[in-house]
C-alpha cells in the first residue's frame, strides 16, 4: 500500500485475561465468541482488534433462539477507510465458527464513523460482500488479518 | 391456501442467486425448463419430466464465467440464455440440440455485472452493474450484440434491470435507493432517464433489490432493504404516438410484513405476487377487494416460514396453465412450489 497510514499512532491496550465470567450459557457463548474474533489483526497495524479497542466483550450479542448475531465495532478514527475490511474479516471468521444459517449483522458503533450510515449499509449488503470476497486483493488482505501473525498476538 | 413443496433441487455448491423459467416451455406438451445461477460460477438447466412431474438437471454451463454468476435470463423465444457475472461479462448461450454453447460474450462493464434482461420482442438486451451504469445492447443477426447506449444516472451500483412487459421502457433499481425509468424518446434516438422514483415521493429508504410487473403492465411492485414492498401504477403504459410519458405513481407501501431485507418480488399472471426475503420466508400477497378507502390495497395471502434454511434470494412464477413458484436460496438449493387452495 502506497498511502500513509490512516491512523499512524493508535492507542494500544493490554490484552485481557480470558476467564469465563458466569455460568450463564449465553454469557459463556458470547465470551467464547469474543475470544474468537478479537485476535483478528488490524489491517494497518500489528495489533489485534481487541488491543486497539475496536472490539470489546460487549461488541457481540448472540441470539441463539433466532439464530442472529450482532457485532458492533469501533474504528480507531472517524474516517477509517479500513472499516469495511474489518467488517469483512469479522464476517469471514464468524462464518467458520457458526452454523451457516446464523444471520450476522455488523455495524460500527453509533457516532464512531463519519459515514456511519453508508459504512453500515455497505457492511451488510451481501452482494457487495460476496463480490469483495472474490476480489483477490481484498481476499488477501482479509486472509492476512485473519491468519498471519496469529501466534504472535 | 397452502404453498406445497413439490421438489428440492440440489446440485449447486454455493448460494443460488437467481433463476429464470424458459418462457417458451410449459405448454403444447413442451416440458417446463428453467435455468439457475450461483456463487459456484455455474449455470444449471433443469427440465421437468412430463410423466413424473419432477425436475432433473439437464446441463451444467461451466468454465466460461470465472466468478459468481449473478443473474440469468432467457430470450422471449427461449432459444438464447444470457448470463451476467461478477467477472464483468455477460455470456450468451444457444441451445444446440440439447447442448449449450457460449455464442457471444458481452464486455464493457468495468467490474461486476449484476443483472441482465431481454425486452419483450427480443431485439434489445439490458445489463447493469457495480460501475453504476446501465447498458443497452441491440441484438443483431448472427449472435452479434452492439452497445447502443450507456446510461449514467444512478449514484451507486445498479442491482437489477427490468424491461416493461410490452413497451420498450427500461426500469433499473439501485443501492442508491432509487428506481429509474429509461426510455428512447423517439426524435433524438437517444435513451434517457424519464423518471426517478425515490424517497421524497414515497420511494424506498434503502437499497432497492428488485421489481416486477403485473400481467397488464400498468402496475409494478418493488422490494427493498428498507423491509417494505411498494406497489406503483401508471395510467398509460405507452410512450409513443405523440403522447408524452405517463409517469408512475406510488399506490401503496406494505410495511410490517418483513423483518429482514426483501430480495425478490414476482407478480403472477393471476395477480398474486410473491416475495423472497432474508428471513428465509416466502410470502404471497393479493389484491384486497375489501380494502377500506385509503388503506393498503394488498393483503398477505400466506406466509411460508422457513421456506429455505437460509436467505431466499429469488422467487419466480412459472409459465404454463398452472403456475408453480420456484425459489433460490443461500442454502444452495432451489425449491419448486405449488399453490393449493
Image: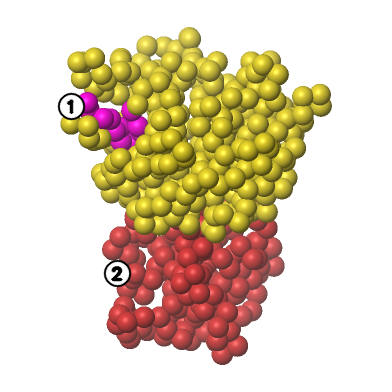
Quadrant (top left/top right/bottom left/bottom right) for the C terminus of chain B: top right
Marks 1 and 2, how far apart in space?
48 Å
Q: Is residue A102 visible?
A: no
Q: Nearer the viewer, residue B93 or B295?
A: B93
The magenta stretch spans residue A9:
no
The colour assigned to chain B within the rendered structure: yellow
The percent position of residue B87, horizontal first and vertical second, equals 48, 57
The percent position of residue A3, horizontal first and vertical second, equals 30, 80
- Span colored in magenta: B169-186
Q: Residue furthest right?
A: B52
Badge number at residue B41 = none
The colour assigned to chain A within the rendered structure: red
According to the image, label 2 marks what residue?
A79
The magenta stretch spans residue B181:
yes
B31 left or right of B85?
Answer: right
Decide: few, some or many residues near mark 2? Use Cα within 10 Å; few <14, some 14-19, many ≥20: some
| Overall secondary structure of the magenta section | strand
Decide: few, some or many residues near mark 1? Use Cα within 10 Å; few <14, some 14-19, many ≥20: few
Q: Is residue B331 above or below residue B204?
A: below
Q: Is residue B129 above or below residue B287?
A: below
According to the image, label 1 marks what residue?
B187
Q: Secondary structure at mark 1?
A: loop
Q: Is residue A124 above or below residue B140?
A: below
Q: Residue at x 48, y 9 (%)?
A: B290
Dividing the picture into quarters, in which one does residue A82 lie? Answer: bottom left
Q: Is residue A150 visible?
A: yes
Q: Residue at x 54, y 55 (%)?
A: B65
Amino acid at each position: 500500500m502506497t498511502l500513509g497510514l490512516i491512523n499512524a499512532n493508535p492507542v494500544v491496550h493490554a490484552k485481557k485475561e480470558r476467564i469465563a465470567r458466569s455460568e450463564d450459557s449465553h454469557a459463556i457463548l458470547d465470551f467464547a465468541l469474543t475470544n474468537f474474533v478479537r485476535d483478528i489483526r488490524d489491517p494497518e497495524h500489528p495489533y489485534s482488534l481487541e488491543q486497539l479497542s475496536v472490539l470489546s466483550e460487549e461488541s457481540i450479542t448472540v441470539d441463539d433462539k433466532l439464530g442472529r448475531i450482532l457485532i458492533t465495532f469501533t474504528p480507531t478514527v472517524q474516517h477509517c477507510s479500513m472499516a469495511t475490511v474489518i467488517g469483512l474479516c469479522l464476517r469471514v471468521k464468524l462464518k467458520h465458527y457458526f452454523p451457516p444459517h446464523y444471520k450476522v449483522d455488523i455495524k460500527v458503533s453509533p457516532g464512531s464513523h463519519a459515514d456511519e450510515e453508508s459504512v453500515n449499509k455497505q457492511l451488510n449488503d451481501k452482494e457487495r460482500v460476496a463480490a469483495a470476497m472474490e476480489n483477490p486483493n481484498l481476499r488477501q488482505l482479509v486472509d492476512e488479518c485473519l491468519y498471519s501473525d496469529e501466534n504472535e498476538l | 391456501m397452502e404453498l406445497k413443496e413439490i421438489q428440492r433441487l440440489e446440485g449447486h455448491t454455493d448460494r443460488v442467486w437467481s433463476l429464470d423459467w424458459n418462457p417458451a416451455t410449459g405448454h403444447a406438451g413442451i416440458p417446463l425448463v428453467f435455468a439457475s445461477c450461483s456463487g459456484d460460477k455455474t449455470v444449471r438447466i433443469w427440465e421437468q419430466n412430463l410423466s413424473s412431474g419432477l425436475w432433473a438437471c439437464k446441463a451444467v454451463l461451466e468454465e466460461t464465467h470465472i466468478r459468481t454468476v449473478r443473474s440469468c435470463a432467457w430470450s422471449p423465444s427461449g432459444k438464447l440464455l444470457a448470463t451476467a457475472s461478477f467477472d464483468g461479462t455477460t455470456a450468451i448461450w444457444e441451445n444446440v440440440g440439447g447442448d449449450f454453447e457460449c455464442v457471444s460474450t458481452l464486455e464493457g462493464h468495468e467490474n461486476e455485472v449484476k443483472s441482465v434482461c431481454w425486452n419483450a420482442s427480443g431485439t434489445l438486451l439490458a445489463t447493469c452493474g457495480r460501475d453504476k451504469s446501465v447498458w443497452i445492447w441491440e441484438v443483431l443477426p448472427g449472435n452479434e450484440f452492439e452497445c447502443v447506449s450507456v446510461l449514467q444516472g444512478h449514484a451507486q451500483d445498479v442491482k437489477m434491470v427490468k424491461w416493461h412487459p410490452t413497451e420498450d421502457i427500461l426500469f433499473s433499481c439501485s443501492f442508491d435507493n432509487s428506481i429509474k425509468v429509461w426510455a428512447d424518446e423517439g426524435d433524438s434516438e437517444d435513451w434517457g432517464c424519464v423518471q426517478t422514483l425515490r424517497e421524497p415521493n414515497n420511494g424506498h429508504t434503502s437499497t432497492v433489490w428488485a421489481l416486477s410487473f403485473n400481467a397488464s403492465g400498468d402496475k409494478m411492485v418493488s422490494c427493498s432493504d428498507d423491509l417494505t414492498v411498494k406497489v406503483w401504477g401508471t395510467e398509460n403504459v405507452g410512450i409513443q404516438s405523440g403522447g408524452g410519458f405517463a409517469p408512475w405513481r406510488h399506490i401503496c407501501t406494505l410495511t410490517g410484513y418483513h423483518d429482514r431485507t426483501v430480495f425478490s418480488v414476482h407478480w403472477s399472471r393471476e395477480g398474486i405476487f410473491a416475495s423472497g426475503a432474508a428471513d428465509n420466508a416466502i410470502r404471497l400477497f393479493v389484491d384486497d377487494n375489501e380494502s377500506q378507502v385509503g388503506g393498503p390495497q394488498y393483503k398477505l395471502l400466506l406466509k411460508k416460514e422457513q421456506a429455505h434454511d437460509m436467505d431466499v434470494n429469488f422467487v419466480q412464477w412459472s409459465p404454463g396453465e398452472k403456475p408453480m413458484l420456484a425459489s433460490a436460496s443461500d442454502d444452495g438449493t432451489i425449491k419448486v412450489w405449488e399453490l393449493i387452495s
